[in-house]
Image: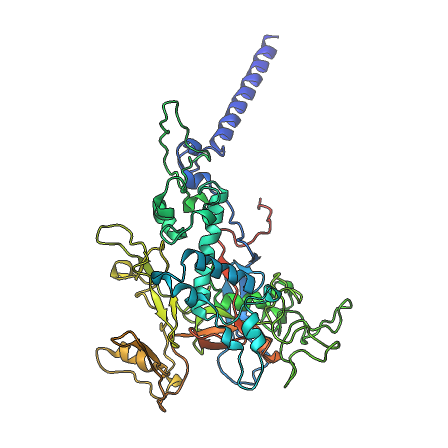
Amino acid sequence: MKVNKIVALQVMMSIVLMLGTASCSKKSSSSRGSRATGWDVDSQNGTAARNAGKKQQAGPGLVFVEGGTFTMGKVQDDVMHDWNNTPTQQHVQSFYMDETEVTNGMYLEYLEWLKKVFPPTEESYKNIYAGASPDTLVWRNRLGYNETMTNNYLRHPAYADYPVVGVNWIQAVEFSKWRTDRVNEAVLEKERYIKRGAKTQDVSAESLFNTEAYLASPSTSYGGSEEIVLKKSPNGRRPKKGKDGTVEEQKNVYAQRSSGIILPEYRLPTEAEWEYAAAADVGQREYNIYKGQKKYPWSGDYTRSAKRKNRGDQLANFKQGNGDYGGIAGWSDDGADITNKIKSYPANDFGLYDMAGNVAEWVADVYRPIIDNEANDFNYYRGNQYAKNKIGKDGKLEIITKDNIKYTTLSNGKLVATNLPGEIAQVPVDENETYLRQNFSKSDNINYRDGDKQSSRYYDFGDSESADDAKKETMYNSPVHNVTTDSLGNMVRKYDNSSKRTTLINDNARVYKGGSWRDRAYWLDPAQRRYFPQDMATDYIGFRCAMSRVGAKTERRKSPRN
């Protein structure tokens, strides 16, 4: 009996010990405990640790594009013999992209905001609204009557859901920056970091919200008003107010990147991103598709639908032949003679509309005849110009005011504001950032490894100490049109009519992708590429925005491996 009791006691003690060990193990792996230190992060202001694993939310208007590999530049037809789309294998990181092109309605919202905040009647702001406005004269034709579009296309409600045109590349970039700030402003208001209604009621040129300025110094937003820029405790509640009126002291009271709620910037997609998203190989897994043989954003070699439900319908609006911009009325028609309302045609396998037809679209890249996959085959992009925040003489960030707004003068003399009050002034990176680096050595990388001497018969390697400068000047011997002002402030335009110019390619030539309502089906192939001056606009080029993906590549759930 004693032996049995002893055995039973030993068994009970073993069970208790096992339970205690399990309890300790469970406690050490608790969500409240840091995996690095074991500290209770919920009570230690551990913002980054507490928000670990928080997923990025898609911004308004965006759809998810899962990244992957594809053959960039592979076209089935090359009747132009441009020699500018040699196939290269590229990998694109996951990102988000606008479901549709930016519409007239979306762009008018931007213009109305600018007019409200920067009244054109004030001398300091007179060029901001005008500089952002699309060029409606792009519709005019010497031998065509298009005044109806000139007067109505941008502002008439009948065209509100049509893609905006007459916007140059610089204006598209500025719209993207504005959109970033307005979206993040709304996010912070929703999360109670900004007073309700502040983004519409308390906005003025002297107290604007800018995402980067807020992250660097929240007190610069809305003129530093604590009634608008609210404080919030790390655990999600507002600081408590005592009976004596004092407010409890809190740390990290403003939203930060580590809060996980502020979205990355809206921007123009890179050429690689746009082509990858347009081809949408995700819906086709055959070998030939994987290698980049897909001719259009949809399956098949024809522009008409083969599905029984809508067999014979055109899958995009484009120029079908000389004098034929839509087909015979009532039959074989693509439903449009110029642009068309967004979502008028089926989406591709990523859920993106009008990646062929409607309007061609600006992308971020500077144009060059080749894609240098020897230097990089991941997230390819040509056009990096690295900058950093400017620090004033007082050691503080220099914030743009109405007295130092920066304008870019277009080749036609028009001024476009490229920074606005409330933004942080930027300067090129210098040796402090580039010294002994292997991945980049200077701020401007547009001409990196740009050694195509066949691009100009006047190419000169240079034999002086300034060989790099000589090379840059003669690489692409393109026209240089100057716009200056004289001593009286009058505009002086100098048109370059030299007969020795051999190309239109220069550092201001930007890529645009996709066929438009003015183009033949040849240009609907996502791999086709063209270029246009970044400060000029047309009636057939629009744009859509993209946003980088942070975190996991895919949104698909994967079961953990055992």
Q: Quadrant of the C terminus?
A: top right
Provide residue 13's location: percent of width, then percent of height.
54, 17
Q: Residue furthest right?
A: 308
Compared with 39, 508 (above or below) is below
Q: Quadrant of the N terminus?
A: top right
**Frontmost residue, 241 versus 122:** 122
Provide residue 172's location: percent of width, then percent of height.
46, 66
- Picture colour scheme: rainbow
Q: Residue furthest top?
A: 1
Q: How many marks?
A: 0
Q: Quadrant of residue 229?
A: top left
Compared with 152, 54 (above or below) is above
Q: Residue furthest bottom?
A: 499
- Res. 70 in view: no
The reply, left or right, for residue 259 in relation to residue 469 is: right
- Res. 522 in view: yes
Provide residue 319's location: percent of width, then percent of height.
62, 80
Residue ID at (22%, 50%):
394
**Frontmost residue, 497 versus 199:** 199
Residue ID at (30%, 65%):
441
Residue ID at (37%, 58%):
420
Compared with 26, 446 (above or below) is below
The reply, left or right, for residue 481 in relation to residue 93 is: left
Q: Quadrant of residue 97?
A: bottom right
Provide residue 256's location: percent of width, then percent of height.
41, 45
**Frontmost residue, 294 versus 525:** 525
The reply, left or right, for residue 493 in relation to residue 520 is: left
